[in-house]
Amino acid sequence: MARLASIILVSAAWMASFGSLAVAAQMPLGCFSRTYDTAHLRIHHSQQVQRLWIRFEESRYDPGKIDFGMNLWVRSQKQIWRAGGRCKPSGRGLRCQPDTDGASELLVTLEGRNLRLTSPGKLKIFDDVTGPDLNERLIGGSADSTFLLQATPDAACKDARP
C-alpha cells in the first residue's frame, strides 16, 4: 500500500511539472508594450509609469525558463528605467523574478491576445546610465501594479533584451 501511495505521489508530481511546461509553451515569446495617453494619466494621477515595453525570450542559461527585459518610462523622468530577470511556469502563467535584490516578483498571464503583468509589491528598477548600484527607484502602489500589454513588433523592444 505504501508503495502504491508513493507511485501515485511521483505520478502526480510528474503530471504537475508537465502541466507547468505546457503553460510555458503557451506563453508567447517576444515583445509586449503599452503607452498611456495624457487623458489616461490625468484620470490616474498617481500612476507613475507612462510607457512600458517587455520582451520575453527562451533562457540561454536555464533550459525550461524564460528571461525577460523591461524598459519603463516614468512621469517627469527623462531617462529610461530598466528591469530584467528570469521567469518560470506557475499556475496559468509565469512567475518572474527580477535580478535586483529586494525586487517584487512579477506575475504574467495571458488574457486573449493580451498579456497581463502584475506586480504584487514594489517594482525595483534602475536607470540606463548609472546602473543598479547608483540610481534605483521603487515603483508601486495600486496605480502601478497591473498593466495590460499588447503584442508589439519585435523591433519596438530591441533595447529591452534580457
Image (cartoon, rainbow, N blue to C red):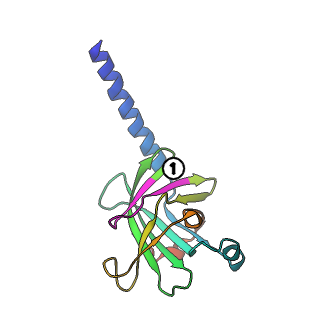
- Range of residues picked out in magenta: 95-109
Viewer-closest of 112 and 146: 146
Q: Residue drawn 50% across and 75% down?
A: 72
Q: Nearer the viewer, residue 68 or 18?
A: 68
What x and y, as percent, mark residue 100?
34, 67
Q: What percent of the width, then of the height, locates residue 45?
A: 65, 74
Q: Quadrant of residue 2?
A: top left
Circle 1 residues within 10 Å: few <14, some 14–19, many ≥20: few
Quadrant that contains the N terminus: top left
Element assignment for label 1: helix
x and y, in percent, of residue 54 in the image: 49, 68
Tell me, yes or no, if residue 49 can be seen here: yes
**In percent of the image, x 34 and y 65: which residue is there?**
99
Per the image, the residue denoted by label 1 is 26
Residue at the spot 48% in from the left edge and 44% down from the top edge: 91
Question: Which of 154/16 is in front?
Answer: 16
* 126 relative to 61, above or below: below
Tell whether position 106 is magenta: yes
Quadrant location, the C terminus: bottom left
Say whether residue 8 is magenta.
Answer: no
Q: Nearer the viewer, residue 122 or 25?
A: 122
Q: Is residue 159 among the parts visible in the rendering?
A: no
In which image quadrant can residue 21 be found? top left
Q: Is residue 107 above or below residue 98?
A: above
* Residue kind at label 1, given as amino acid type: Gln
Q: Position of residue 27 (x, y in %)?
A: 50, 53
Q: What's the residue at 56%, 75% (across, down)?
A: 48
Is 145 situated left or right of 97 in this image? right
